[in-house]
Image (cartoon, helix red, strand yellow):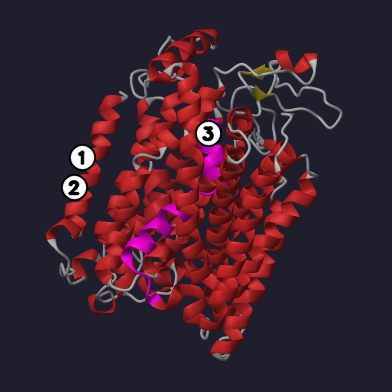
Amino acid sequence: MTDVRLAWIDYVLMAIYFAFVIGIGVALKRFMRSSTDYFLSGRAIPAWVAGLAFISANLGAQEVIGMGASGAKYGIATSHFYWVGAIPAMVFVGVFMMPFYYGSRARSVPEYLKLRFDEKTRALNAISFAVMTVFSSGVSLYAMGKLFRLLLGWDEDASMLVAAGIVLAYIFLGGLTSAIYNEVLQFFLIVFGFLPLVLLGLKDVGGWDGLQARLMTHSVAQGYAPTAYTQSWAFMGDATRNPVGVEWFGLAMGLGFVLSFGYWCTDFLVVQRAMAADSMTAARRTPLIAALPKMLFPFLVILPGMIALTVEPRREATPAAAVARVGIIPAKTTDSGEVIRDTNARPVIDYDLATPAMLAHYLPAGLLGLGLTALLASFMSGMAGNVTAFNTVWTYDIYQSYFKRDASDAHYLWMGRAATVGGIALSVATAYVAAAFNNIMDVLQLVFAFVNAPLFATFLLGMFWKRATGHGAFWGLVAGTLAAAFHHGISLPEGATVGVKGGFLGVLLSPYRSELAQTFWTAIIAWTVCFTVTIAVSLATKPRPDEELTGLVYALTPKPTEEAAFWQRPGTLAVVVLIGTLLLNLIFF
């Protein structure tokens, strides 16, 4: 464990931040007069605020820590999660999908599924989404518990409870509006907190050229070509030649299409921010505004992990630590301090500690407090996003639909606050599942493969094929999820043991090179099965009349008018974003 000593100024900065975020909740509590205010901010949020909240809700601790971990584990190829696995899908949801969501006046993604298909499809998605948000929120808690233990020496269990309590306070009081305005604050904190870390790290290793030179040694030691950690596409022709352990088709189809579009287009966590915008045009611009800074975030969150691979620690806590570490990233250890090893007897490197270790290594008093506060802010935004999505889906799509249909609006507002408490409690329980992985981004992608991958097939057919039916959507989702479970149950990554990481039905496939490779193919299979079954069942069942689908299917939806100036229009923003992303892919090819 890294030896970190915080100065009084660091504690003051964190205390001010905690007081501020809770204060926002207190200030907004008096505006929470109805369930719409609490769950959808009264649909009155400006586009730029919704856009920053859209990106910040995704920019949780699991991304800041998880992407740093992936940068250390996979190198610059982690940028695929942005330039392939995020930006195109964000453009798609802004240009094509927001007219359906916002125009239908649905209060949630599951409610849109009810309008387009039927009640059972909505129920299946609502339940699976609620489970997913709880798991995702639990991952945030786990990451934050590790951070507090590493940097402050606190007990991990107590740290998770304290952090959960802070999130609970401001969401309970101010609902989605509190979350959104805190997410805007958190966005700027993350940028200004991590920028000094990147600049100091690059200066120490000799800039990008120096980092490339150092990573060549690490890459060769891992059995790859010298530039495998600093080129994003050059070695994707063969899964054995790149650290991600996946070939270009698995990456492009599994991440770039299924997981990416499945997350950004169907996950209510992010869609909720756009649905809170004050107009259709603002709702369409929301993900496009978010995509502009999203293009540059690899330099802010991935580079610290890559730098951590090449930096020598100032001193070792124990002789064993010098053997069981890579750069300044330690190995996982048992409670007794024994290094944990995989089935190949190699130390299991705790990549999740890459970014926290960088904070401790480079930032002096004051800056360390700012960096730590930024990390805390990322945790707050990610967990708050999951909690606000969970309480909305629970209240509208589960409780109101199946338990108390005709209660007063005040009752649903009360239930939303109760669901916030329940969601936090369940998140604490699921935090311990994440401990089985040495990269929290891996477990998140696995959850998305089970839930979002088949769901995207359902949405794609539902929005662009009017013949898709409710029976087809429901059985497609069931078949896709079961297919994901089956593939995960018969496969296993290299060095893993049977259990959470797969193989529980018997290891019938050759081991995948990495957890991500396994997850990408799990997503591909889930999407393909759902897509195929939905078409087959839809063709065998009776479709709904066209007049019932107006506004819910692309061919039957009036095209939105462009109210903004040319440079603010969704189409213009989309072109700018796509060109910028293409150039970044070419630069790091």
Quadrant hosting residue 310: top right
The x and y percentages for residue 417 are 63, 75
Of callouts 3 and 2, the N-terminal one? 3
Q: Main secondary structure of the magenta part?
A: helix
Q: Position of residue 317 (x, y in %)?
A: 78, 21
> What is the x, y in percent for residue 217?
50, 8
Q: For this rendering, which residue is in front, 262 or 140?
A: 140
In the image, residue 449 sits, relative to residue 199, either above or below, namely: below
Q: Residue at x 40, y 40 (%)?
A: 297
**In the image, what residue type sits under mark 2?**
Val
Residue under circle 2? 575
Residue 533 showing in the rendered view: no
Amino acid type of the residue tagged 1 in the rendering? Ile
Residues in magenta? 43-70
Cβ–Cβ below 8 Å for labels 3 and 1? no
First reached walking from the N terminus: tag 3 or tag 1: 3
Q: Which residue is mark 3?
A: 68
In whole angstroms, how far apart are the C-alphas of marks 1 and 2?
6 Å
Q: Which residue is mark 1?
A: 579
Mark-to-mark CA distance, 3 and 2? 29 Å
Other residues around mark 2 within 10 Å, as few (<14) / some (14–19) / many (≥20) = few
